[in-house]
Image (tube, rainbow, N blue to C red):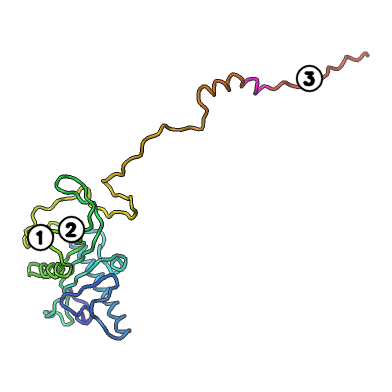
Amino acid sequence: MEFPFDVAAVLGERVTVVDQHLRPAGRRGPAHRGELQQQQLRIVIDELGKASAKAQGLPAPVTSAARMEANRHVLYILRDAEGRGAAKGAVVGFLKVGYKKLFLLDRGGTHNEAEPLCVLDFYVHESLQRHGYGKELFQHMLRSERTEPRRLAVDRPSEKLLAFLRKHYGLADAIPQRPRPAARPSGPRATSSPTRCPSAPRRAPTSSRPGPSRRRRRAAGSGAARRRPRPATPRRAPQGR
C-alpha cells in the first residue's frame, strides 16, 4: 500500500510498534517534524484499517487512529524496507493485539474468567500475500509480547486466519465461543452474558392495598361512614290568608 509521503520517515523500522500515543517507538526530532509525522501516521493507520475491513467484508473498520487513542492496543506495522516499485516506500500490512477481560468456554463447557492477549485485526495487502510477510509480522509480535500462539485469543477469526494459524503453528483445535466473548464490565460483581448472577431469594409481592379482612371491616361500616346525617331544618307553619 503506497502513500504520497515518505513511509520510511514515518515508520522508521521495518516493523514499527505503535501504541495509544500514536508515536512510533524510537522516533525523535523537532517538534514540528514530529507533528507532521504523527499526522501522516494517522493516515497510514486509517487507510490500513479501511483496507482490512474491506478485505474481511466488515461494514466499518475496527482499526483507526481514533480507536487506537481510545484503547490500550498495540499495532505492529510492516513496511517494505526495500521499496520495490514504490519511490516513497510502501506498507505491507499490520497486526493489532490487546489484552481483554473475557469469559471463555473451556472444553467442558464451563465459563472461565481470563485476560488473554487477543488478536484484534490482521491484514496483509492482497498483492503481497503468501510471501511470508504475515508470519514475519506474527513472529515479531510473539517475541515482543513474550507469548506463544496457543495462548492467544482471536476476535472473530476469519477462515483465512484460522488456516494461517493451522499452517504455521499447528493450531487446528480451537475452542469456539458461544456467544462471541464479550469484555467483562467493570465492577467487582459485574458479569457478562451468558454467565448469570445468582438470583436473590424471591419474596412475596407486597401491596399498598388493604388485605381482605381489613376491606371487609371497612365495608361493614363504610355506608354509615359515607352517609352523613343531613341537618334538620324547621318546617314553616302555613300562614293564614
Amino acid under label 3? Answer: Ala
* N-term mark: 1 or 2: 2
Question: What residue would you read off at disc 2?
Answer: 154
Up the image or down, 230 lies above or below 29; here it is: above
The local crowd at label 2, few if under 14, some if 14 to 19, many if 20 or more residues have their Cα within 10 Å, is some
Q: Quadrant of residue 27?
A: bottom left
Question: What residue would you read off at disc 3?
Answer: 232
Amino acid under label 2? Answer: Val
Which residue occupies 29% across, 84% down? 33
Q: Indicate the position of residue 30 as horizontal and vertical percent values.
A: 30, 86
Question: What residue would you read off at disc 1?
Answer: 165
Amino acid under label 1? Answer: Leu
Residues at marks 1 and 2, CA–CA distance in whole angstroms: 10 Å
Q: Quarter holding the C terminus?
A: top right
In the rendered structure, does residue 144 fall within the stretch colored magenta? Answer: no
Up the image or down, 223 lies above or below 163; here it is: above
Q: Which residues are magenta?
A: 223-227
22 sits to left or right of 154: right
Judging from the image, what secondary structure is the residue with disc 3 in?
loop
